[in-house]
Amino acid sequence: MIPATLQDIENISKRLKKLEVIINAIVILIVIGLDIFPIFAADPFFIQLEKRLIEDGVDAHLVHAIYRHPAVKLELDIITGNLKRSEKDLKYEQFLSDSKITKAREYMKQHYLTLENAYLRFGVPPSIIVAILMVETQLGTYTGKYLTINVLSTMAVANDPQVQKEIFRSLDNENTSTEFQKEMIKRLKKRVLRGYQELKAYLDYLKKSGKDPFLLKGSREGAIGIPQFLPSNISRYGQDGNGDGIVDLFDHNDAIFSVAAFLQANHWKQARTDSEKKDVLLRYNPSVYYVNTVCSLADKLDR
C-alpha cells in the first residue's frame, strides 16, 4: 500500500468536514420535517419571541424546532451576571504572564504559514492576530460554556416586564432603589435591541452551517468560536482560511483569517499611529483594558 501524502490527508480531512456539515444539516431538516414538537414554545417567555421571528421572515420550521425543544430556556443568571460585571474587574493581566507568552509563541510557530498568508492578504501582523486569539479564548482552548441560543434568546426578551421583575429579584441583595432599576432598564433596552438582531443572524448562521443549536456554546454575550465573533459578524467577516469551502470559526485557519478580515475591513492598514491602531481594536472589543492587553502582548511577541 502506498503511504498517504500530507496533501492526501488534508484533502481527506476537508472532505470529512464537508460531509459532517451536510449530515448535521440533514439531521436538522429531518427533525424539522417530523414536526413532533409541542404546539407552544417549551419556555413560555419565548412564545411571543417565536411569533416575532416568524413574522420577521425567519424560517418557521427552524424556529419551531428550536423553541419547542426542552434545552432552550430562559437563563436569567446570564443577564444578571452581565449587568453586575465590570470590565475593570476582569483579570486581563493573566494574558501577559510568561506562560501565556510562551504558548502564544508556540502557536505562532504552529500556525506560521496561515498567519503569514493572512498578513499578505489582509495586512494584519501575526502578533496582533495571535494576541487577540489569546485574550479571547486562550488560543481556542476555551470558547465558552453558555448555550448560545439561550444567551441570545434571553437577551431578546429582557424587555418583558415579568422577565425584568425576575432579574431585579435576583439582584435584591445588590440594590433595589428606583434609580438603580432605571439604570438597569436603560442598559437592558440596549441588550434587547442587540440581542434580537444577533439572534436573527445566529438563526441564519445555523440554517446555513448545519450546526447543532443544542450543542453550540459560546460567551455570555453570545459570541462564538475561537475569535469570539458575534453572529452578525460571521457573514460580514468570516473567512475560509483552509480552502475547504466552509467558514468554521472553530477551525484555527478560518479563525486567523476571520480576525484579519475584520481588522482590515475596519481600516487597520490606514492606522499609522498606536492611537489609531487602538481605535481599530476597540471595534473588535470596546474595552480599553482589552485593547491595552492585546497591544502589550503583541509587543512582547514581536520582541
Image (tube, grey):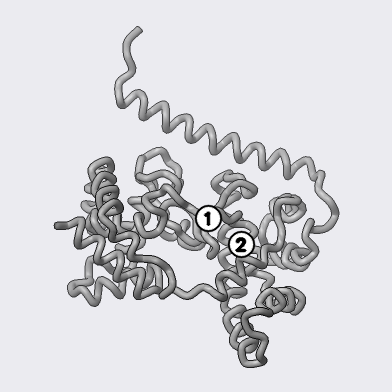
Pointers 2 and 1 in contact (C-beta within 8 Å) = yes
Sooner in the amino-acid sequence: mark 2 or mark 1: 2
Q: Which mark is residue 139?
A: none
Residue at image mark 1 = 218
Q: Residue at x 50, y 62 (%)?
A: 232
State the image quarter where residue 135 is shown.
Answer: bottom left
Alpha carbon of mark 2 to alpha carbon of mark 1: how far?
A: 9 Å
From the image, tell me which residue sits under label 2.
151
Label 1 Cα crowd, 10 Å radius (few <14 / some 14-19 / many 20+): many
Q: Residue at (58%, 56%) from the top-left corner?
A: 146
Residue 115 in the figure: left or right of residue 239: left
Q: In the figure, 296 relative to 245: above or below?
A: below
Q: Position of residue 10 (x, y in %)?
A: 36, 29
Q: Of residues 193 and 141, which is closer to you in this image? A: 141
Residue type highlighted by circle 2: Val
What amino acid is labelled 1 in the image? Answer: Gly
Mark 1 secondary-structure assignment: strand
Q: Residue furthest left?
A: 303
Quarter the N terminus occupies: top left
* SS at mark 2 in the image: helix
- The x and y percentages for residue 9 are 36, 25
Q: Residues within 10 Å of mark 2 (few under 14, many from 20)?
A: many
Among the 4 quarters of the image, the one containing residue 148? bottom right
Residue situated furthest top in the rendering: 1
Q: Is residue 46 above or below residue 175?
A: above
Q: Which residue reaches farthest right?
A: 39
Residue 263, percent across and down?
Answer: 32, 63
| Image spot of residue 46 (x, y percent) | 75, 64
For the view shown, which residue lies furthest in the front direction?
Answer: 173
